[in-house]
Image: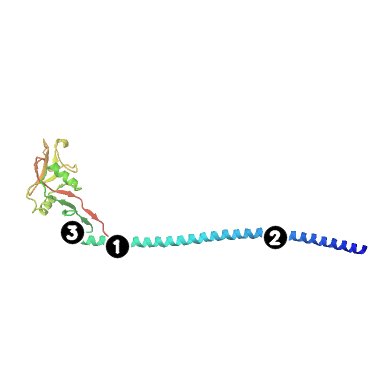
Amino acid sequence: MGEEITYADLRFHDTSHFSASRIVEMNLEVASSVPNQSHCRCLKKTYMTVGIVVGVLIISLLAMTVLFFQASNKQNYYHDRIERMAQTLANVKNDLCMRNEGEQKDACLLCPMNWVLIQKKCYYMPDKMLSWQESQRFCSAQNSSLAMPKTFEELELITCNFRRWITFSLWIGLSCSLKSNGRWVWLDNTTYSSYSSQCREIRCASFDYSPLLFTTCSTKLKLICQRLPINLPSIN
């Protein structure tokens, strides 16, 4: 009986020792598994971050590629438009400028509709009868002034080109007043040196087939306007 008790005690003791040892081993296994799980989570975060960065780079690269092709297409579009416009201007130049080729040489000087090009100036004679002041206001509204033929040659050219319309005297941009100390002055403030006599009242100048005439500024006469032409540049 005593031997059985002793055997039972030893068996119980051994079982308790085995269980405690197993528990310690299991705890060690659990403890060792915790760092491994943390390490895995860190790796997952790293992979996710790298994936996001790579994705952003790919999207950026695709966006830059699309923008590059769009810019290239726009450049080609505007280049084609410029070429078409240049061709259109060349056609306009050929249509409008060749008629005055002898006078214009390399330049293309264009006058508004119903204006006449004479010696690199545009002239226009409206069908109106106005005073000198009214005539100047009318020409100003056309971005021009009353004509200022300062040489006999220029006066003769105007007369020849408008011969069939000149049936009356025409106002020109020359006048005399006390404000100019009685001198005859063109509208550009240059002095008319061919006539030295001073005026004692406001007088204005006109012309027809004969040389310059001086008359009262309120007289109703026809007029002739003058302006610079539009210079269309050469197209290579």
| Residue at (13% x, 45% y) in the render | 172
Callout 3 amino acid: Asn
Q: CA distance from mark 2 to mark 3?
A: 100 Å
Task: Describe residue 40's horizontal placement relative to residue 9 as left or right.
Answer: left
Callout 2 amino acid: Ser
Task: Report the front residue among 194 and 118.
Answer: 118
Q: Find numbered disc 1 in the image and state the secondary structure of the residue it sits on.
A: helix
Task: Describe residue 7's horizontal placement relative to residue 32 as left or right.
Answer: right
Quarter occupied by residue 96: bottom left
Q: In this orientation, does residue 62 appear?
A: yes
Task: Report the front residue among 201 and 144.
Answer: 144
Contact between marks 1 and 3 (CB within 8 A): the answer is no
Q: In this orientation, does residue 174 appear?
A: no
Task: Report the front residue among 62 and 116.
Answer: 62
Percent across and percent down for residue 145 are: 17, 46
Q: Which residue is mark 3?
A: 100
In the rendering, which numbered label is found on residue 33? 2
In the rendering, which numbered label is found on residue 130? none
Q: Find numbered disc 3 in the image and state the secondary structure of the residue it sits on.
A: helix
Q: CA distance from mark 2 to mark 1?
A: 77 Å
Callout 1 amino acid: Arg
Q: Which residue is mark 1?
A: 84
Percent across and percent down for residue 189 are: 19, 42
| Residue at (27% x, 62% y) in the render | 87
